[in-house]
Image (cartoon, helix red, strand yellow):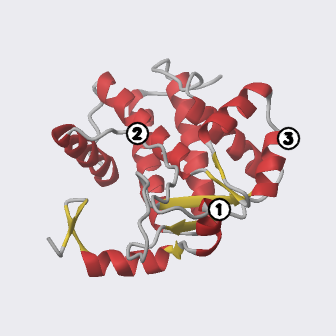
Amino acid sequence: MNSRVSKNDCIAEISRFYKKYYTFCKSPDPDHVRDVLQSAYSLNDKLKKASITDFFDSEEFLAIKAIRNFITHQGEMLNESKSHPLISSFPIESDVSIKCLIPAEKMVEILNSSSKQAKEALNNEIIVYRNFSDIYPCIFNFGVKLFLVIEELGFEISSEDYLSMKKSIDFERVNGYPHFINGKVHLPLGGCVDDFINNHLITMEVRAEQLAELYEDKDGIFTSKLS
């Protein structure tokens, strides 16, 4: 006999997802990508079994589910997590600096192993470059969508990582910033975006060093030390 999934079970899984998410944002380790994808899948499973909600109408979730299924049942992720340089000799326009890059041939394998609906979701939510596909915006936007749904449901969650997301959302509301990201890169002075992705991104370790040098973390919001 199946036991009933409770609201508290779902709250625990929501807290776990945001913990995995923030670890994923800071680390290039492929295991952390696997963890956050698995957590999103498990979270949706619990929410559905508890008859609270589910995200099968979310293309972000369907893309996450397709990638999770591939790395669980068929192959490894082989991703690289990198960042735009925070100090650059040329301007870079994008609404997010972090990239979670999967080799192009690996994304082809994922697409070929996916259902028609999942393929459509992947094509809509994953940013494709010549040699890589970026899955970071998809995961980020799912985290935002999850927060907005949970907030509307009135769940009381006190975990540090969930509250970090709440601070970010509240900051965006106060300042009129969008919650969701596009993730695409534009080089205002011209140049090849694929060359930029291949040759000018920095490691997450270097990004952490540059953040510490240039910015101050105030309750999860980074402000410039130079202003």
Quadrant of the rendering where the N terminus is positioned: top right
The residue that appears at 24% across and 43% down in the rendered structure is 172
Q: Does label 3 or label 1 sit earlier along the sequence?
A: 3
| Residue 73 visible in the snapshot | no
Counting from the top left corner in percent of width and height, residue 4 is at 52, 24
Front residue of 207 and 52:
207
Quadrant of the rendering where the C terminus is positioned: bottom left
User: What residue does disc 3 label?
Assistant: 112
Specify the amino acid type for callout 1.
Asp
Q: Measured along the vertical axis of the image, is residue 94 above or below residue 181?
A: below
User: What residue does disc 2 label?
Assistant: 180
Residue sticking out furthest to the top: 51
Front residue of 39 and 152:
152
Q: Residues within 10 Å of mark 1 (few under 14, many from 20)?
A: some
Label 3 – label 2 distance at C-alpha: 28 Å
Left or right: residue 150 compared with residue 196: left
Q: Measured along the vertical axis of the image, is residue 4 above or below residue 78?
A: above
Q: Does label 3 or label 2 sit earlier along the sequence?
A: 3
